[in-house]
Image: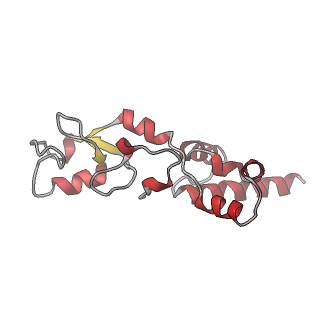
């Protein structure tokens, strides 16, 4: 799943893969300098040459890729902004304060969305907008059952 860094609420240059230019998915490293890239991007880069794409130092094969857990933690806490919410406000929709009450899932981190979806027994793969929609739909169905 590729995420455009421009969708982030706050800029995070160290979270961007230098190979695909998206927010890193499963950040991994194999060189002594700990240059990190998406695991998939790194594996593709190692085909044909066993060198780090950043510093060109020799690295072992893909079986030696190490997860960058610190970077995973940072990425897990990133918040995405919703371009549709901004357009809605510009078009005369509810202000951000009221929108937060109408769409609370939209302000959650991807990690928090997945946690709540798992607690509800729902599938967790997908983009943030897909996760938000899935959670909102389940919340609405739950409210309809109670009322």
Residue furthest right in the image:
147
Residue shown at the point (34%, 56%) measured from the top left: 21
Coloring applied to the structure: secondary structure
- Pick the quarter of the image with the N terminus: bottom left
Q: Picture coordinates of residue 40 (x, y %)?
A: 29, 54
Residue 62, image x, y percentages: 20, 47
Q: Position of residue 123 (x, y in %)?
A: 57, 54
Judged left or right of residue 18, residue 2 is right
All told, the count of numbered labels is 0
The image quadrant that residue 55 belongs to is: top left
Nearer-the-camera pick, 94 or 15: 94
Residue 74's place in the image compared with 44, above or below, is: above
Q: Nearer the viewer, residue 37 or 134?
A: 37
Q: Which quarter of the image is occupied by the C terminus?
A: bottom right
The residue positioned farthest toward the bottom in the image shown? 91
**Residue at coordinates 38% horizontally, 55% vertically from top-left?**
22
Query: Between residues 46 and 100, which one lies in front from this camera angle?
Result: 100
- Residue drawn at the location 87% of the way across and 51% of the way down: 146
Kindly identify the residue that appears in the image at 23 percent across and 53 percent down.
43
């Amino acid at each position: 799943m590729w995420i455009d860094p421009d969708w982030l609420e706050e800029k995070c240059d160290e979270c961007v893969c230098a190979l695909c230019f998206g927010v890193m998915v499963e950040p991994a490293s194999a060189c002594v300098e700990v240059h990190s890239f998406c695991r998939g991007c790194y594996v593709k880069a190692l085909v044909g040459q066993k060198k780090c794409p950043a510093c060109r130092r020799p690295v072992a094969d893909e079986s030696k890729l190490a997860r960058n857990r610190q970077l995973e933690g940072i990425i897990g806490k990133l918040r995405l902004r919703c371009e549709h919410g901004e357009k809605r406000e510009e078009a005369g929709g509810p202000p951000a304060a009221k929108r937060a009450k109408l769409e609370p899932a939209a302000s959650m981190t991807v990690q928090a969305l997945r946690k709540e979806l798992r607690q509800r027994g729902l599938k967790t793969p997908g983009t943030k907008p897909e996760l938000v929609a899935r959670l909102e739909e389940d919340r609405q169905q739950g409210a309809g059952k109670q009322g």
